[in-house]
Amino acid sequence: MKQAWRRISVREQRLLQVSGAFLLAVVAFSLIWQPTRQRLETVERQHQQQTVLAVQLQRALPRSHVPVDTDQPLSLRISESATAAGLEIRQMESESDLLRVTLNGNAQPLMQWLDGIERDGVALQTLTLEKRDDALEARVVLK
């Protein structure tokens, strides 16, 4: 191998050295730098998605866990707010400090109403949603 190297001219030796260095740089870029950069971009993208999800979750959380201070009983407040939201109350039963309510209505107003009562400090113990024709039926136990 050394003899073959000595037989070629100095100019060709330098050309082979430069070509080898260039090839080494290309291999290093292809096998090390580029995959590392791609992984970094993927992790940055995932971080941005997680940040967006965290912001959406913060917006979705109830803003207030403090019960609304009112002289009205829970059943009256629920009845009035459901009627104002355009929902139909099918059944309402009061049992000690719990209130069982069955409502019908369009999905969007129903979900907004549920969000609103929760933000007003009413605790949802259970929630069951069922699609009935073009409407949504909700059975909730409130505290």
Image: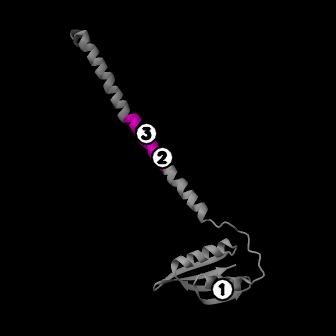
> Majority secondary structure of the magenta segment?
helix
Disc 3 marks which amino acid?
Answer: Arg
Q: Secondary structure at mark 1?
A: helix
Up the image or down, 80 lies above or below 66; here it is: below
Q: Is residue 109 above or below residue 31?
A: below
Please state the horizontal and vertical placement of residue 37, each as a whole percent of the image.
43, 39
Is residue 5 visible to the viewer in this orientation of the structure?
A: no
Of residues 133 and 24, the one nearer the viewer is 133
Report the magenta residues as a range: 31-45
- Is 34 magenta? The answer is yes
Q: Earlier in the sequence, mark 2 or mark 3?
A: 3
Q: Quadrant of residue 76?
A: bottom right
Residue 132 lies in magenta, yes or no? no
Residue 137 horizontal side relative to residue 133, left or right: right
Q: State the residue position of label 1.
A: 79
Q: In the image, residue 90 lies at what x, y percent? A: 59, 90
What crowding class fits label 3: few (fewer than 14 Cα within 10 Å), some (14-19), or many (20 or more)? few
Compute the Cα span from label 2 to label 3: 10 Å
Residue shown at 25%/11% (left/top)?
11
Determine whether, in the image, residue 105 is placed left or right of residue 67. left
Q: Where does label 3 land, which residue? A: 37
> Which quadrant holds the C terminus?
bottom right
The amino acid pointed to by label 2 is Val
Using the image, tell me which numbered label, if any, was put on residue 64: none
**Residue 40 picture location, percent across and down:** 46, 42
| Mark 2 vs mark 1, CA separation in Å | 49 Å
Check disc 2: other Cα within 10 Å, few if <14, some if 14-19, many if 20+.
Answer: few
Could you tell me which residue is drawn at 34 percent across and 26 percent down?
Answer: 24
Type of amino acid under label 1: Ser
Q: Which residue is mark 2?
A: 43
